[in-house]
Image (cartoon, rainbow, N blue to C red):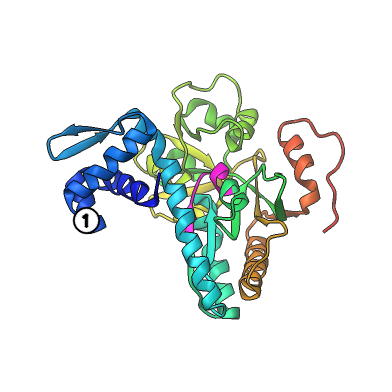
Amino acid sequence: METRHLEAFSAVMSSGSITGAARLLDRSQPAVTRLIQELEAEIGHPLFQRHGPRVTPTEHGFGLRDDVERALASLRQVGERARQISQPSVPSLELVATSALALGLLPPALAALESTLGHGPLQLRSSSPEQVVQAVLSGAADLGLSSLPLEHRGLQVHWIGQLPCVAVLRADDPLASLSVLPVSALAERRLITMSNPYRLRHRLESALPPGRPESLIQTNSSVNAQALVRAGLGLAVLEPLTPLGLQSQDLVTRPLDTDVPFFFGVITLQARPRNPALEQRVQTLAQALLAHARSLPGFEEHPPSAHTHLLDAAHGLASEPPPTSL
């Protein structure tokens, strides 16, 4: 399996046809067809169903797509790193963050970074929390921002932050007249929640009263949740960063009378040799992120050593106070 096979597969997945992929790759249509056939022969399964000039990915095609995209992204990063060696004064900063942190925390921190160290090339990708961790562990990202848990071997957690979740509702919702929203008021409302049961959703369900409606709407993105609220499909309880970074006149946020904490942190790879200029940018950005987080209402800062305690407390398991060595 060669890079050209992966590039052909990715182009067909993106364009939806062999002809479109040929245009994207500046190759002939027969050449792209041959590359796909060679890849299918090596894998042993068809990746596409042909419908005239267009194709539909098979189950195997859909299953392979994420792995191929990660492999191609890693190859592109190798090329970028090679360019950095020849131009060490202009290192590229590779960032990965969950959508909430990319929206509400990262932009002002990047502005502070560039006001201090000047402009430099960077790439920002939004991913799930699990993918953020994987990108940093694999070296595909220089710095990651994600919700807890983040305690993995090989990761350096720079700091941990805590913010209280808020209710997001339409401005014309009757509950918008309240300055603080009682959690009990959510019992009669349709809720829009995160689909991952092991992160924020678990803490939310622990705080909600029993007997609430079962017609939940689940999504993997807080941005999606806000769009669903705007459409009048329900109200959401989210971390406060998405509403901060994606403000809308149609929506309002209200604090809850019960604390539903959102834990997040900044991570890099331990013991990884870096270009000195890149290392300076990474460390400066980590501090700029903390400085901006400290300006947010209700922010609490925790040392990396508090990681396990914070997770246990969020799940009702902690019995001793967290470390305070800040």
**Image spot of residue 105 (x, y percent):** 56, 59
Q: Quadrant of residue 315?
A: top right
Specify whether residue 129 is painted magenta.
yes
Q: Tell me which residue sits at (53%, 50%) in the image.
A: 98
Specify whether residue 218 is painted magenta.
no
Q: In this view, does 290 lie above or below 12?
A: below
User: Which residues fall within the magenta stretch?
Assistant: 124-132
Q: Relative to residue 105, is residue 4 drawn left or right? A: left
**Image spot of residue 169 (x, y percent):** 45, 42
Mark 1 lies on a secondary structure that is loop
Q: Is residue 146 above or below residue 201?
A: below
* Other residues around mark 1 within 10 Å, as few (<14) / some (14–19) / many (≥20): few
Residue 166 is at least partly visible in this image: no
**Image spot of residue 213 (x, y percent):** 48, 22
Residue 279 is at least partly visible in this image: yes
Q: Relative to residue 161, is residue 31 drawn left or right? A: left
Q: Relative to residue 218, is residue 257 drawn left or right? A: right
Closer-to-camera residue (226/249): 226
On the image, numbered disc 1 is attached to which residue? 27
User: Quarter holding the N terminus?
Assistant: top left
**Image spot of residue 238 (x, y percent):** 54, 43
Q: Tell me which residue sits at (76%, 52%) in the image.
A: 304
